[in-house]
């Protein structure tokens, strides 16, 4: 049975890949096949696919590579990537400045975002509102990628070559920025919410990717630290008993009884902290007991093959540093052009 399934999903993946090359769109069956194959092979199928992509997508030269992450050249970059390979994450010594955090926080309390329906609620709740800080009406409020692309501080981060330098080294391929998001997690509910990513899960939207999470508020154990299971991003890092549930949300009890508390990394840190993480490993945003948390995320992937994200474009006013980068590294920004 397992062999038949593997043959079906491998064929789906390969056929879907050819369609993707021709049309730049991933058929749903191919995306589903990638997830199934990941679960059946305990991660190996994504490793193989990524090795092939790395062979085709030769690296770009991102120059000096000094920026928000610090100086990401030579040994320091190797240290970061070695942490990512071994434990699945790296917390940078450098932090985003107070001024930038202040401006992004200011933006996040004055610009509309979308209320995300909680578990069991219908889409009627997803209204666009200015976040009512202190009086939330749902667990999660999301900013759209299209709106974020117009923000000058976000544009400057997208033009900061320290990020793709690290991503490229980790992905072993020329990267593309494919997810840009920012959201509030709130204390609206007294229990964690699956739709707000507050249960353990792994991501599998691309063959390989690296996420950068940037805290824009101070994060304590009570206001929803991002949480990761150390080492679970590795091949065979997630046990078959969890993988056989597919793309499921897992309880704390199930995950912690398998890995032990010592593998649970709760990122309690001041605002401005930047975490790089391979979210192929198990992770979640911890339930917010009190207060709220604002986080910005930039994802770099080795391909746009995989899950669907709403189209967003860098077509408004673009700051000069980003304009220069777009002309130098068109592939890096191809998802938003
Ligand atoms: O909000 C969090 O910390 C979890 C985010 C998450 O699950 C993701 O970005 O994949």
Image: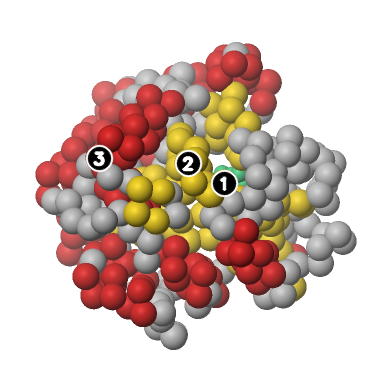
Question: Is residue 32 positioned above or below 331 on the image?
Answer: above
Depth check: give the residue in front, 258 or 331.
331
Give the distance between the C-alpha atoms of the residues marked 1 and 3, in whole angstroms: 22 Å
Left or right: where 57 falls relative to 326: left
Left or right: where 41 falls relative to 291: left
Rendered-image quadrant of the N terminus? top left
Single out the residue that lies furthest toward the bottom: 317
Q: Position of residue 285 (x, y in %)?
A: 64, 41
Residues marked 2 and 3 touching at CB (< 8 Å): no
Residue receiving disc 1: 273
Does mark 1's beta carbon lie closer than 8 Å to ligand 1?
A: no
User: Taking the image as drawn, is residue 79 in sight?
Assistant: yes
Query: Quick one: label 2 or label 3, which is nearer the N terminus?
Result: 3
Q: Residues within 10 Å of mark 2 (few under 14, many from 20)?
A: some
Left or right: where 103 falls relative to 86: right
State which mark lies toward you, 1 or 3.
3
Residue receiving disc 3: 74
The label shown at residue 3 is none
Question: Is residue 195 positioned above or below 281 on the image?
Answer: below
Give the distance between the C-alpha atoms of the residues marked 2 and 3, in whole angstroms: 15 Å
Q: Position of residue 21 (x, y in %)?
A: 18, 60
Q: Please identify the quarter of the rendering in which residue 33 is found.
A: top left
User: Taking the image as drawn, is residue 33 in sight?
Assistant: no
Left or right: where 311 falls relative to 147: left
Question: Is residue 337 positioned above or below 242 on the image?
Answer: below
Identify the secondary structure beneath mark 1. Answer: strand
Residue at 45 percent of width and 71 percent of height: 155
Residue at 28 percent of width and 75 percent of height: 324
Residue receiving disc 2: 92
């Amino acid at each position: 049975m397992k062999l038949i399934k593997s043959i079906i999903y491998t064929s789906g993946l390969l056929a879907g890949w050819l369609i993707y090359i021709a049309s730049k769109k991933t058929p749903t069956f191919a995306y589903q096949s990638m997830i199934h194959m990941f679960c059946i092979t305990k991660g190996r199928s994504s490793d193989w696919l990524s090795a092939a992509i790395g062979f085709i997508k030769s690296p770009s030269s991102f120059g000096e590579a000094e920026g928000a992450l610090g100086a990401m050249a030579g040994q320091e970059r190797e240290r970061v990537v070695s942490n990512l390979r071994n434990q699945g994450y790296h917390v940078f010594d450098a932090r985003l400045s107070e001024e930038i955090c202040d401006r992004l926080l200011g933006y996040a309390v004055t610009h509309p975002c979308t209320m995300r329906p909680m578990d069991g609620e219908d889409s009627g709740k997803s209204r666009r509102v200015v976040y009512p800080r202190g009086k939330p009406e749902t667990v999660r409020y999301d900013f759209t990628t299209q709106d974020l692309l117009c923000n000058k501080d976000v544009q400057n981060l997208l033009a900061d070559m320290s990020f793709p330098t690290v991503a490229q080294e980790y992905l072993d391929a020329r990267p593309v920025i494919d997810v840009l998001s920012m959201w509030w997690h709130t204390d609206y509910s007294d229990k964690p919410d699956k739709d707000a990513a507050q249960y353990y899960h792994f991501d599998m939207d691309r063959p390989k990717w690296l996420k950068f999470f940037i805290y824009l508020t101070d994060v304590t154990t009570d206001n929803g630290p991002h949480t990761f299971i150390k080492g679970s991003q590795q091949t065979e890092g997630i046990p078959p008993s969890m993988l056989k549930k597919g793309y499921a949300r897992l309880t704390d009890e199930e995950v912690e009884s398998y890995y032990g508390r010592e593998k649970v990394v709760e990122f309690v840190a001041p605002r401005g902290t930047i975490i790089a993480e391979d979210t192929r490993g198990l992770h979640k945003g911890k339930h917010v007991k009190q207060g709220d948390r604002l986080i910005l995320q930039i994802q770099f992937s080795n391909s746009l093959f995989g899950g669907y994200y709403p189209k967003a474009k860098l077509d408004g006013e673009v700051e000069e540093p980003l304009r220069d980068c777009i002309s130098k590294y068109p592939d890096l920004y191809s998802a938003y052009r």
